[in-house]
Amino acid sequence: MNEDRYQELLEKCLEGTLAPAEADELHKELAASPVRAKDAREQLAFGDLLSQELAPGREFSAFWGRLQQAIAREGTDVVSTGSLPQPSTASSFGMRLRYALYGATTAAAILLFFFFALMRGPANDRGGAGGPPSAIAQGEEISLKGEVVCTHCILQETQDCGLAVRVTDKGQVYYLSDNDISREFKGRQGCCRKPCPVVAKGTVQEKQGQSVFVALQLQPRE
Amino acid sequence: MARMDFIERLVHEHHAGLRAYIRALGILPDSVDDLCQESFLVAFRRFDEFDAERDAGNWLRGIARNLAANERRKQGRKSRLMASGLTNFFLQQADEVLAEPAEDWQELLHSCLEELPDSGRELLMQRYGAGDLAESMAAKWQMRADALRQKLFRLRQLMKRCMERKSGVKWK
């Protein structure tokens, strides 16, 4: 494999956009060349350091904040099962205080959410399309003006990255179903941890209480 | 030492290196953060098992390696892994990737970014700061996507060599 091809495949590997045949080709090359295998590992690691430093939300404080929340959720289980030793009294008090604050914050957020949802009324829900999602007939083709965002990085609603269309002026979120259009969009634009303005055409389906948008077209707009 | 203080210190000292290590195991970029968080959660649970004489970085990397290996057995989570056995390949080589970035890697990185020409710096910012991919960047830069990928590759090499030169340490 010549150097240009190796560089292109490795870059696609870093992007996460390798096609299966390209992944095979790169795999064979790395298995045959220890020097390139070492280089690939270094490039993967170094690329992540660049992301950590240049991308918002990847710095230490943001990570630590998310981890503290996860520990707070986990902490209840740890204490109740008694499977791990209790921390010192001071730490235990500090953790309980953190859990209490976390719980109070979560409860307040839920109350505020319902308060604003009631105040807003159903007429705002549909966003650019007009009318609430429930008023959209299943299978009816609609057009949304909004932005594609990552359900993990921006909405922080899912464990893994996924795409959703957020109607810009209304805040209504439609989760994109996995089809050729959304996959191709993700291949071009990435996971959208920076909102990508679009005009989206497609149909809406209600699945498990969520508005799922089956995209027929995702057209980036300036 | 209190469990929470212990974990905070671990995160502060090893978060950057552990993320980079997890990425080098062949975990896809969007899932590195999750696996890194899971690794620290396991460390939190096993607080009482940690031997203070041990290298905490090695301990964390061992946890991360085990979690990454487990991913292969979880059908629903295959989307976190690289295609075509690439993750298996990188996992097999994992023991060799034990070094961590220099303590002052952030300062070095900034200093080396400053030394790049404006266009190179902007390319890296767009790729790694905004998270844009080569296909979408190519139109803006009026380049072919494959040429842009090669440019990014070379810019990263330049940055890495610059950091090694300034620190006097070869980082891997």
Image (cartoon, coloured by chain):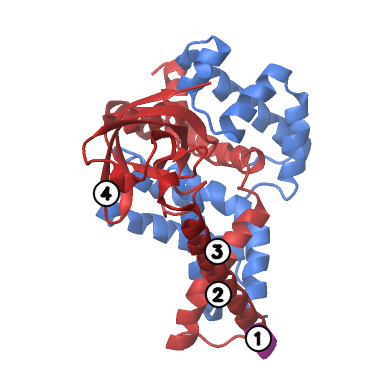
Where is the C terminus of chain B found, in terms of image quarters? Answer: top right
Crowding around mark 2 (Cα neighbors within 10 Å: few <14, some 14 to 19, many 20+) is some
- Element under disc 4: strand
Q: Viewer-nearest of labels 3 and 4?
A: 3
A152 to B66, vertically: above or below? above
Q: Are marks 4 and 2 in contact (CB under 8 Å)?
A: no
**Residue kind at label 1, given as amino acid type:** Phe
- Element under disc 1: helix
Earlier in the chain: of badge 1 and badge 4, it is 1
Q: Which residue is mark 1?
A: A93
Left or right, A18 with respect to B30, comes to left
Q: Are marks 4 and 2 on the same chain?
A: yes
Earlier in the chain: of badge 1 and badge 3, it is 1
Q: Are marks 1 and 3 on the same chain?
A: yes
Q: What residue range appears in magenta? A: A89-93
**Residue kind at label 2, given as amino acid type:** Gly
Earlier in the chain: of badge 2 and badge 3, it is 2
**Residue kind at label 4, given as amino acid type:** Glu
Q: Is residue A23 visible?
A: no
For marks 2 and 1, give the CA distance. 15 Å
Q: Which residue is mark 4?
A: A206
